[in-house]
Amino acid sequence: MSQTINGALWGIFFHELGHAIIGVNRVPITGREEDVADQFALYFSTHFIESQGTPVVQPTIWLFTQMAKGHDIASADQDTLKRLMSNEHSLDQQRVYNLACWALGANASRGYASAQYVGLPQDRASRCSSEFDTLDRGVRKQFQKYLKIKPQQS
Ligand SMILES: [Zn+2]
């Protein structure tokens, strides 16, 4: 359990690091900054951290899964729905599927467990490799110049 908490804390930290890099450097993005921060965290975790043997993405997925249990939109009242839908973050459940998809796209063997864990539908899973390639190209283009370290193979 402590390794899960440790990995989830790193996942949150890299998400926040993504925000900081965007903010400090005025990184041009279009679309939700929260989703871009998730993409940066996934990119950084897979290229720099998980290759060193520290799981980050699956623990982060676990954390968001726990958070999603507290936001059951099927039984939410109107005020709760309004708050969730107007929030700058994607829904926790969407973030779970996104991370699992990108993890699968980044590394089919490591990401498979995450895709299984979240029950990623096959039609989404079939596009994750391409989705990750686009994410990877975008993050490299927009963020790599602010990092002094070079990515390793994921
Ligand atoms: Zn954020």
Image (spheres, rainbow, N blue to C red):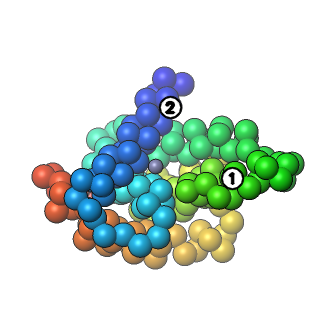
Q: Which mark is residue 84?
A: 1
Which badge, 1 or 2, is on the more N-terminal residue? Answer: 2
Q: Amino acid at mark 1?
A: Leu
Residue 37 position in % (x across, y down): 41, 55
Based on the displayed image, in which of its 4 quarters is residue 49 positioned? Answer: top left
Hey, which residue is sitting farthest top in the picture? 2
In this rendering, the label closer to the viewer, 1 or 2: 1
Q: Which residue is mark 2?
A: 4
Quadrant occupied by the C terminus: bottom left
For label 1, the SS is helix
Badge 1, how many Cα within 10 Å: few under 14, some, many 20+?
A: some
What residue is shown at x 31% (from left), y 70% (from top)?
28
Quick check: 126 above or below 40?
A: below
Q: Residue at image x 73%, y 41%?
A: 69
* Residue 95 position by quadrant: bottom right
Q: How many marks?
A: 2
